[in-house]
Image (tube, rainbow, N blue to C red):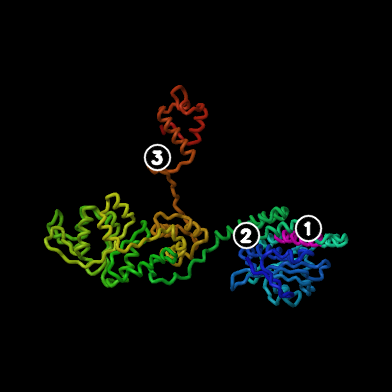
Amino acid sequence: MSNISESAFSDINLPATANHAAAHPSGTTLNSAILLSNLFAIFFKKLHPLFSIDCGIILIYDAQRNGIKEAYISTYNGDTEQIDTEIISQHAELNTIQKSIAEFSYPVIKSMEEWIEEEEMNHCLVNNETQYKYHCYIPLEIENNILGTLELHNNERELSTECLTFCNSIADFLAEIICLQQTHAAENELIITEADSKEANESETPEFNNTPLAALNEKLGSIQDIDTLREFVSAAAILFPKAYEKIKFQLDEIYAYQTQLDDESLHPGEASLPASAYPEIIGAGAGMKKVFALMDQVAGSESTVLILGETGTGKELIAKAIHERSVRKNHTMINVNCAAIPANLIESELFGHEKGSFTGATDRRIGKFELADHSTLFLDEIGELPLDLQVKLLRVLQEKEIERVGGKTLIKTDVRIISATNRDLLTEVEQGRFRRDLYYRLNVFPIQLPPLRERTEDIPLLASFFLHKYGGKKLTGFTRRAIRQMRDYQWPGNVREMEHLIERQVLLSTKPVISEINIPEVVKTIIDKEGTIQKIKTIDENERDHIFAVLQLCKGRISGSDGAAKLLGVPPTTLNSKIKRLGLNKKHF
């Protein structure tokens, strides 16, 4: 949780634990110090990101408020990005500024300039000469008795009103703990005095732990592992119910305020795309790194590649990147979408035809295989190829020669095949829709592309890329809310859907920052007993459909022996009310 040490007046290093009571039976000063230090470190761990607080200090004064009895200092270490906590346990006299602070009976905010103007010096920390630009001082007070001060410091900006309000409640909470700690210590001293005066049996040990402070100490093992301030406050609520109610109220307001700021703040985005061997392909997550590694392995070879992935995942882009890094890159890659060509024309499209080979063949046509000679042929949507064409394709792949439709000569070809599909080809094989021998011929080196919902870490990169592509300099970015919306969406159309959605948002946007994405509504479905996919309906929708069906059966009659009310088992007046509420009308039936 934090690095805790007792320093400045001692060389003892204390671990972050509460198991030191046995070494100090005549009171719980050290034990209580570790407890309070850990609790304060938990608070500070959340105060730093919430309000940019760089340093927090609890000062506990002596009875006359002439000196500092104990001090707990938590600072944010920018190098390690951790919270360092220090305990000062030796009495120290108050300096000039500290005396002024000890007299504050209400929260005070000061800047470096104000201290220099008033005292001709800035406020330094009690353990060293570190100075900050902005300061806040909140008295730790119980029943008009000031026990100490909660100090907050930072260099970034003046502490906000929200911060001051919330930390006031934190100060009340800490004051209760300090008061309980001091009361406990006094009670222990009284027990020891009474035990000595009665010459108690040495085998009998006074009970020091039957107090709320000891109860909190026992729970420290679980409390100190809590990561969030809200969980910690809830865990300590049973011991400090009064302070808990105040803090919980303030905490709810702070989190609501933080959520609002988070939603409206600009997502930092990326200054530039991560360096990659494939700059034309946007992706830096683990899923795409695996794809890039496979592309590196196969690009320089002559092996057949099968690219698998859902629609819109960028299969053609991957095929093009492989071709451009192969020895055939100086020749244009030829693309064929097997799903876009009518079944009766696909053979001619692939292999070409001779003049007069069929009605309408007025000229000789060169097929895609001939055009791709010494290059790459990309067969997209290969799963849509008819079975009779699959046989011919298999022969071409095996023999590396083609015959034009209506032709009589064989033409040798040197073509590398890259194919792609969004279907599960093995399932297609099992169901007899795809030839097994062709499947094994194509599946030499498969590359599986992850769907966008499984690579959410790439969504901000893709969003920024498409925003610059369609928005130019007119739009500057997205809010965090917009990015979160895109991360939460399932993207059934994957990257293609995202590109079109952002293009639409660019056209609709009237501000330089896109604050919200018009995510399509997803219709949730279930499969009934017959295996039919049906939309999940609300209770009102089900009731409306059922009443509508019964009214149709009764030809619109509501009351009477053959009316819908009798069949539904409700009074006619009730059915009339339901019909009106559900928006049914006689014209519907």
**Which is in the foreground here, disc 1 or disc 2?**
1
The amino acid type of the residue labelled 1 equals Glu
Disc on res. 195: none
| Residue 66 against residue 503 in the figure, above or below | below
Q: Where the C terminus falls, by quadrant?
A: top left
**Which is in the foreground here, disc 3 or disc 1?**
1
Residue 306 relative to residue 114: left or right? left
Crowd class of label 3 (few under 14; some 14 to 19; many from 20; radius 10 Å):
few
Ranked by sequence position, the earlier of labels 2 and 3 is 2
The amino acid type of the residue labelled 2 equals Ile
Residue interval drawn in magenta: 170-188
> Image quarter for residue 368?
bottom left
The amino acid type of the residue labelled 3 equals Lys
| Residue 286 against residue 359 in the figure, above or below | below
Q: Where the N terminus falls, by quadrant?
A: bottom right
- Find disc 3 in the rendering and name its residue: 529
Disc on res. 207: 1
> Image quarter for residue 103?
bottom right
